[in-house]
Structures are given as C-alpha cells and as structure tokens.
Image (cartoon, rainbow, N blue to C red):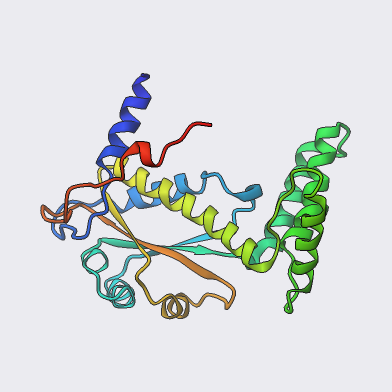
Amino acid sequence: MKESAVVFDKIVEERRSVRIYEGQADFDPKAVQRSIERAILSPNSSNMQLWEFYRIRSEEALERVSWMCMNQKAAKTARELVVFVARKDLWRRRQRALVKEMKRVYGEPKTKGAKRALNYYESLIPKYYYNDPFGVWGFIKKCIFFFVGLNRPMVRHGNATDVRISVHKSAALAAQTFMLSMKAEGYDTCPMEGMDSLRIKKFLKLPRKAEVTMVIGCGPAAGDGIYSERFRIPNDEVIFEV
C-alpha cells in the first residue's frame, strides 16, 4: 500500500463525529478556510458547483445558530460552525459561467469532443435544470426518459425533486471532503441535520429556494467528545461483488 494511502487510511480511521469541543485549546481558524477551499474541489454533478459555504464565527452568531441546532453540544461547544447550502436556484448563473469558460478554453470548438461538451452545457443542462412552477416540464421529461429507456439505458431523473436531490448530493460530497480535511489539519467535526433550517435560512438571509444541507461543527475535541466506540455493520452485509 502506498504511503499516501496509509496516511489517508489513518485520517479516515480517526475521523469521528465529535460532540464536545475543547474551548481553551489552540485553534487555527485558517484550517477551516483551507478545508473549505479543498471542499470546493470536490466532485459535483456536471461541475455545476451549486453550493455555498457559510462560516459562523462571531460569539453572537455561534450562540444564535447553536440555538437553531437545538442547542446540541456539538454546536454549542464548537469553535466554528460551517453551514453547507445547496443552491439549485443558481443553475443559470453557473451554466453561463461554464459556457464562458469553455469558450475561453476552446475558442470556436473544432473537435467532436469540444462541440459535444459545449452543446451539453448550452443545450442539455438548461433542459435538465429548468422546471416550471407546475411541474409540467418535469413530467414531460420523465415521460421522455421512460420511453427512451425502453430501448437503451437512460437517465431516469429530471423533475424538480430529482434535481434537488442531485444538488444536495454534491453539497454532501463537499461536506465529507471538508470533514476529512479538518481531521488532516488536526481538528474534529460533527455533521448535524438536527436543526431548524428555516430559521438558519432567515439568519443567513438566504433566498427562498436555497436549502441548508447540513451544519458542521468543528474544533479541537474534548476528552469526552466521542460518546461511544465506533460501530459498523459487518462488511459482508454491505459490500457485494457482481
């Protein structure tokens, strides 16, 4: 096994959801910034990057958001909280940015690959992400996918709910990268879904269509910060070969 794999294995093994953080231990807030910047490099659907990250740092903000996280110790004792936000509503802006970048890189596309990539972002992405208020276009897409899928493999999702789930998946991938990075930096984390997402949205002044994926507390772990030994279902019950 390569040395890098040994290091990564150690990081994964040592990462735990820490519920209590040490308030007096040294803490480098730059580690949070570095970890978010690494999270931005995470894989995400069509590279649309439909996410935002909010660092909760001030004493007043931490107190308010911790209350919105049901006053969990993982929130109340955290040195920082990071809110991961799914921004499906930004798809047009991101799509335009990607098209502009591709045109900068390729100029007038000449190869089949370049033309296919540009067509994907100029034509297919809008068709996938757009959904009218009544869900008619989403229903039509589902029907198209069903009939095309009778003869060949076909994407099966395309309505508003499907797209929403896809965007949250990407935000969750970024969250995992962030947590592993913080562990590599020598700090601990705890992802929280027990929260009042509506109040957090209002506090952050997010638009109506933005959605909070999760809140992650971080900092140096306290001695009693891990509540129990790690338990996982046996590998042979979850890993299969075909």
Describe residue 81's horizontal placement relative to residue 202 as left or right: left
Residue toward you, 154 or 85: 154
Where residue 114 appears, x then y in whole percent? 81, 36
Describe residue 93's horizontal placement relative to residue 68 as left or right: right
Q: Residue furthest left?
A: 223
In the figure, 119 relative to 194: above or below?
Answer: above
Where residue 8 appears, x then y in whole percent? 34, 32
Q: Residue furthest top?
A: 1
Q: Residue at x 32, y 73 (%)?
A: 69
Where residue 167 appears, x then y in whole percent? 58, 59
Describe residue 162's horizontal placement relative to residue 30 as left or right: right
State the image quarter where residue 1 is shown: top left
Count of picture labels: 0
Describe residue 72's horizontal placement relative to residue 96 as left or right: left
Q: Residue at x 57, y 61 (%)?
A: 165
Where residue 159 appears, x then y in whole percent? 69, 65
Q: Residue at x 21, y 65 (%)?
A: 77
Residue toward you, 94 or 235: 235
State the image quarter where residue 199 is shown: bottom left
Residue toward you, 70 or 148: 148
Q: Residue at x 71, y 62 (%)?
A: 129
